[in-house]
Every structure is written in structure tokens, then in C-alpha cells.
Image (cartoon, rainbow, N blue to C red):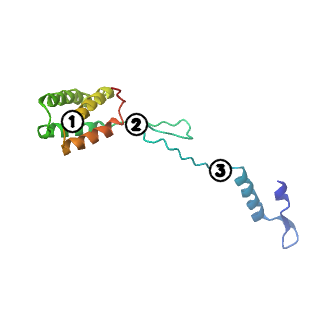
Amino acid sequence: MLAIKHHFRAHEDGAPGVDRAMVISKLLEIDRQKSPQPTHQIINHGTMTGTIIQQATSHSQATLTFNPADVKRVVERIKSGMDDLSLSDADKEQLKEDIDTIEPQLRSANPKRFAIAQCLHSMRNILEGAAGSILAAGIVNEISEIMKLLPAIHQ
């Protein structure tokens, strides 16, 4: 208040008054000095998948979820293109078993994410062996993106 009390002036009629503009200006200056300055941090964590980072939050929640429709779309692409993939009969049979395991999970009200992740992992491994197949390469990429949102499998 010491800095403000010196900003009195006389009105045109000679009566004492306050220079309101000067007082407001000084109050804003004091407020700026006492207010915390925003800080900006840039943190490079490298490549992260299936992870959410929150900073300077209070009681915040964040959820990372997969969309079962994405998995269903991949399964349908595999089923429709199975004959065009250069896979052994054993690999095709394993793909069919993985599909037979995933489909009931996708229809479930509470799908078991780990079971879906395991089947997708198996399917991706099989399709990576389909040398030269553009269809398989595209599906492998889609599976990899979906798996970022599912539980990690350590094999």
C-alpha cells in the first residue's frame, strides 16, 4: 500500500482525490509480481506406447481403451483374405483358432483383454511370416496399433 498512497491528486475543484488509473496500474503490477509465472517443461520420453502422462493435475483420471470394433475389423480382414495369404496349412489353422478365440470375446459385455492381446500377438507373428503379402503387412500394422492399447505380453 505504500506505493499506492503517494498517488493522491487534487480534483479540478481543489478537493483531494485519488488517481484511479495510477492506483489500478500499481495494483496490477503488484499482482503480476506476486503471481506465479507459468512454467513450460518439455520432456522427451522417447517412444511410448499404451501410456498416458499427466502433469500438474489434481485428482485427474485418464483412461486408455481399445475399441473392440477395430479388432473385429482386423479379424474380418484376415478371414476374407486368408486364402490369398501365402501361409502353410498349419499357420492357417492357427489363425482360425485365434479367430475362434477372439470372436466370443468381442461379443462379450466384458471382454478379456489379455486373451484378445494373446490372440492378436499370435496372429501378428503368423502374418509376419507371410512374405511379400501387402495384405498381411497392412494387417500386421493394424494389429500393432491395437496392441498398444492392450495389456503387454511378455514372451
Residue found 28% across the figure and 38% down from its top: 143
Mark closer to the chain start, 1 or 3 = 3
Identify the residue at horizontal 21%, vertical 33% (top origin): 126
Q: Is residue 52 left or right of residue 91?
A: right
Q: Is residue 21 above or below residue 121?
A: below
Picture coordinates of residue 117, whole percent (x, y): 30, 30
- Distance of label 1 from label 3 (alpha carbons): 55 Å
User: For the point 23% across and 37% down, which residue is it?
Assistant: 128
Please state the horizontal and vertical placement of residue 96, each as a whole percent of the image. Answer: 16, 29
Callout 2 secondary element: loop
User: 10 Å neighbourhood of mark 3: few (<14), some, or many (≥20)?
Assistant: few
The Cα–Cα distance between marks 3 and 2, rounded to whole angstroms, is 32 Å
Position of 155 compared to 4: left or right?
left
Tell which circle, 1 or 2, labels the residue nearer the N-terminal end. Answer: 2
Which labelled disc corresponds to residue 37?
3
Mark 3 / mark 2, whichever is N-terminal: 3
Q: Given the image, on which type of amino acid does mark 1 rest?
A: Gly
Q: Nearer the viewer, mark 1 or mark 2?
A: 1
- Point out the frontmost of discs 3 and 2: 2
The image quarter containing residue 10 is bottom right
Give the image location of residue 77, x and y in percent: 19, 40
Judged by depth in the image, the label closer to the viewer, 1 or 3, is 1
Q: Nearer the viewer, residue 25 or 44?
A: 44
Q: Does residue 141 appear left or right of residue 79 in this picture?
A: right
Residue density around tag 1, few if under 14, some if 14–19, many if 20 or more, within 10 Å: some
Q: Secondary structure at mark 1?
A: loop
- Among the 4 quarters of the image, the one containing residue 116: top left
Rendered image: mark on residue 50: 2
**Amino acid marked by disc 2:** Gly
Mark 2 closeness class: few <14, some 14–19, many ≥20 residues within 10 Å: some
Q: Nearer the viewer, residue 50 or 134?
A: 134
Disc 1 marks which residue? 129
